[in-house]
Every structure is written in C-alpha cells, then in structure tokens.
Amino acid sequence: MSQFPNAKFVTSANAASQFLPDTGLEVAVAGRSNAGKSSAINVIVNQRQFARTSKTPGRTQLVNFFDLRTGQRLVDLPGYGFAKVAASVRRHWGQLLQTYFESRTSLRGLILVVDVRRELQDFDRQMIEFARSVSLPIHVLLTKSDKLKRGNAATALLQVKKELGDSATVQLFSALSRQGVDEARDVLERFLANH
C-alpha cells in the first residue's frame, strides 16, 4: 500500500513562470539521466509508472510537479549527462534549475540520485551546490546497489560519505531489490515535515 495513495502528476514547467504556486511543502529529486531517478521515485511512492521510466536516458527535460498529499509535492528535476541535447538547452536547464532552487520557499529538501557504480559527477556537485547555497538538506541515494557485490557497494558508500562529510546524508538503494526503500521514504517524510 502506498503511503501516497492520492499521488498524481500535476504539471510540467519549462520556465519559472510555469512553476506551481510557491505554497505548501515540496521535495526535489535530481540525478543524472542514467542514474535510475524515475525508477527510484516510482518505488518510493509505490506507484508503477508514476514517473515515466524510459530506455532512453534524459527523458525528464522539464521540471515535473507531482502532488503527494494536499499541500505536499515531489518535484522531478531535469536529468542530464547522457541526454543528447544542444548546449543552448543545457544552459537553459542550468538557469531554470538555479532559478528553481533560489526562488522556491516551499522547497524543503533535495534527494539526489547517483548511480553507485560511478563517483559523484559534475552535475551531482552542481546540484549539491545549488542546495547548499539555500541551506537545503540533501540526501543522496546511491542507486543500482544490486549491480555491485556487497563489499564494493559498502566501499562506494564510504567514499561518497567521506567526500560529502556533514553536508549530506547518503544511503545505498536499489529499485530492483528494494534495498533502502524504507529509509528513503523516511527521509522524504522527514523533509516534508520540515516546516
């Protein structure tokens, strides 16, 4: 049973003027386009195809707003990295994301989705900087942990924790094996309770 039985997609924005009204509470989810962001969102919300997954990385090219409960939202941010897009589109995304982080008073936390097999990339560090610049709590999901042996996954977790120090919490996560799902849901609930 989903903790968010009434969760639903509301709107997509390609400009700050299209963002939903800045009321209530929201948590942003970001990640490179091949990190398994949509799968992670679907498992956490416990609704299949809630955020559309695709075989083609980089499908999330807009800021997507989802209602979780009355006055509580999840915001799926554009993922890039593997997305084959023009430099002008990347610049537009960067400006859109910066505006989003700087303007949303309803924003209560960032969940950053990172493939456990890759170290933090420039995009991940940029998201962390955006969040830090507005004193936003950050939680990192190291996804696809089922693809690594337990020891290697534990080593990757330690490395990311060491790099980020006190600036973010970090956990292992797998949409396939369901590792870390309860912990991720708890973090989402904690962010949404952060008035």
Image: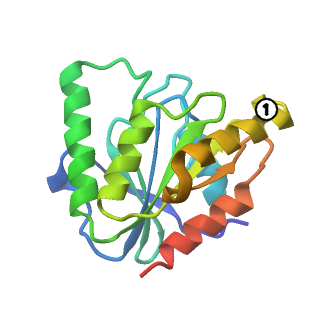
Q: How is the image coloured?
A: rainbow
Q: What is the quadrant of the N terminus in the image?
A: bottom right
Image point (19%, 34%), residue name: 92
Image point (56%, 73%), residue name: 190
Residue 107 lies, in percent from the top left, at 36, 66
* Relative vertical location of residue 15 with respect to residue 136 in this rendering, above or below: above
Residue 11 appears in view: no
The quadrant in which residue 182 appears is bottom right
Image point (64%, 39%), residue name: 159
Seen from the viewer's position, the closer of residues 54 and 98 is: 98
- Left or right: residue 46 versus residue 66 is right
* Relative vertical location of residue 24 with respect to residue 147 in this rendering, above or below: below
Residue 66 appears in view: yes
Residue 153 lies, in percent from the top left, at 76, 37
Q: Which residue is most to the right?
A: 150
Seen from the viewer's position, the closer of residues 116 and 47 is: 116
Residue 7 lies, in percent from the top left, at 52, 64
Find numbered disc 1 in the image and state the secondary structure of the residue it sits on.
helix
Image point (44%, 21%), residue name: 82
Q: What is the quadrant of the C terminus in the image?
A: bottom left
Residue 176 lies, in percent from the top left, at 76, 40
Seen from the viewer's position, the closer of residues 21 and 141 is: 141
What residue is disc 1 on?
152
Callout 1 environment at 10 Å: few (<14), some (14 to 19), or many (20+)?
some
- The disc labelled 1 sits on which kind of residue? Asn
- Left or right: residue 165 versus residue 47 is left
* Relative vertical location of residue 10 with respect to residue 70 in this rendering, above or below: above
